[in-house]
Amino acid sequence: MSRLFAIAAALFAAVAVSAQSAATVIIPRPVEAVSLKGSYIVGEKCVIRTAEQSLVRPAEIFAGYVAGEEGLSLAVEQSGKRGGITLSLDAALAKEEYRLTITSKGVVIKGSTPQGVFYGLQSLRQLLSAAEKCKKGYELQGVDITDKPLLGHRGAMLDVGRYFFTVAEVKRFIDIAAMHKLNIFHWHLTEDQGWRIEIKKYPNLTKIGSKREQTIMGRNSISKTYDGTPHGGYYTQEEIRDIVAYAAERYIEVVPEIDMPGHMVAALASYNHLGCRDEKFKVRTRWGISKDVLCAGKETTFEFVEGVLSEVISLFPSKYIHLGGDEAPRNRWKECPHCQKRIKEEGLKDENELQSYFMHRVEKFLAERGRKIIGWDEIIYGGINKSATIMLWNDRNRAKATSLGNDVILTPKYFCYMDYYQTTRPYSNKEGLMFRDERILTLRKAYSLNPYEGMQPSEYGRIRGVQANLWTEYIPNFHRAQEKLLPRLAATAEAGWSSGKKDFEDFTRRINHLRRLYDKAGLHYATYFFDGVDE
């Protein structure tokens, strides 16, 4: 995008909502927005009213957002009166569907569930942010919006294993997801470099596994320099319950990930007997993939896994538990007498089938307790149960993953990995490091994600959703995390919500309006696109 066009787009963003329809403001793009005559001013005397107890909390959360962003103190009143901003339930609408109508008499938002109403309030939040302020408040032009999402899973993942983020920062991440009408927070809680969830049965996981001695500096593949500073942190079970409740109030389901059998060195450091080799492990201080994984031949390994997951289940009410299943080298299993004995006794073909045995066994344990699993697409190697959901990050596995009949969540790395550079060189050196220079995800590229690419309409039902992932090897603080997420998260959100033909120029106009809300909400975001540096 040229710098001249960026400036023009920014000027366009300053135009009041009165000069355009709501469809050119809201992200994700609504299904239908029809302009109506008249307008309504939302000011200090405006009251949010609802007769439904279940809609009081969504109204209060919305009022909290608006107070900080627009300086408006909107009262919330539980009553059947009309006028102001009125919230109500309408059983004729779908679960996440909402209808937002603005006339000279007020604002009316309807949904069949509080979740739908909450999404309508997020759209109203964007309209208020884009509107110009007058003496009495913010004038909103008449509009009738009918809107609902394309896909059921619209997620964002935060990796806290590499770098720990505070409870307040995790809640901020959830607020960002809510702003974009996402409904899943995928919480990557365990890694080779740090174990972040308190498990009372295994206290060493946090006593030992949550801390690393130091961290690699520079690019992992070539650097031999470390910062010499210990890094650690974990969430107590009380803090986890608090975060899960916070997310639930914003209609976001928290899906925990306990990655296994690979990416488990922090657990091996805590309990050495879980590995194939009889040696003392340390929490890793470098990034990348470790050859040391959980031993799939020992019964004590499964006792450990089941003990951990029993407590995970008690903390997270989510239907799904993410088990990882990715990047688990077979080297140790090939050398391990316990694993080779397991292969022989179970009649398995090779180590690939040993991983399938591992995942099937853990899946059975969870299924007996009413839960289902999600795994990265490596779980398809060696066989997979039909009940498992595949989270697809490897583009090369897409055809196979979508042909198996399993549910699929799309998070292809060259469209959805928010840790990638946002610009082409030489500007990427301002973003910190990445594993390799060619890992670039511009806003235009992120927007181009098509959930159904290469599929027949009869196969669309296999795609459960899309998700943006934020891996944090090179993201040591939350300020940088926000800059990586925004504004690209808006593109992923639209891929999961809006149907119809892609129109990047239309998205460009709307993202400039959303930028105003980012500013008012005090969010940090990358400005490369807005500065005309890169698309």
Image (cartoon, rainbow, N blue to C red):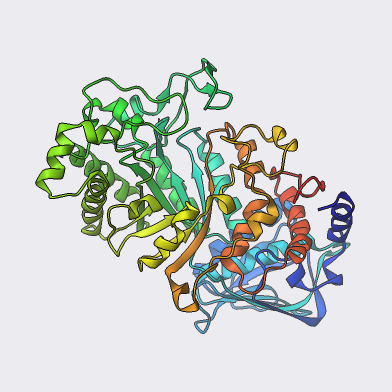
> Which residue is drawn at the image coordinates 65% and 65% (left, top)?
28
Q: Can residue 376 be seen in the rendering of this structure?
A: no
The answer to which image quadrant residue 479 occupies is top right
Image position of 24 with respect to 357: above or below: below
Residue 215: give x, y in percent of width and height.
Answer: 50, 22
Depth order, front residue of 476/108: 476
The answer to which image quadrant residue 122 occupies is bottom right
Is 110 left, or right, of 196 in this rendering?
right
Depth order, front residue of 19/454: 454
> Which residue is drawn at the image coordinates 18% and 40% (left, top)?
303
Image position of 457 with respect to 366: above or below: below
Return the residue found at the far left.
345
Residue 104: give x, y in percent of width and height.
Answer: 79, 79
Depth order, front residue of 346/153: 346
Is 11 left, or right, of 475 in this rendering?
right
Q: How many marks?
A: 0
Residue 266: give x, y in percent of width and height.
Answer: 35, 30
Is 343 left, or right, of 499 in this rendering?
left
Image position of 235 with respect to 454: above or below: above
> Which residue is drawn at the image coordinates 75% and 78% (left, top)?
143
Residue 175: give x, y in percent of width and height.
Answer: 58, 51
Return the residue found at the far front.
349
Q: Can residue 432 be seen in the rendering of this structure?
A: yes
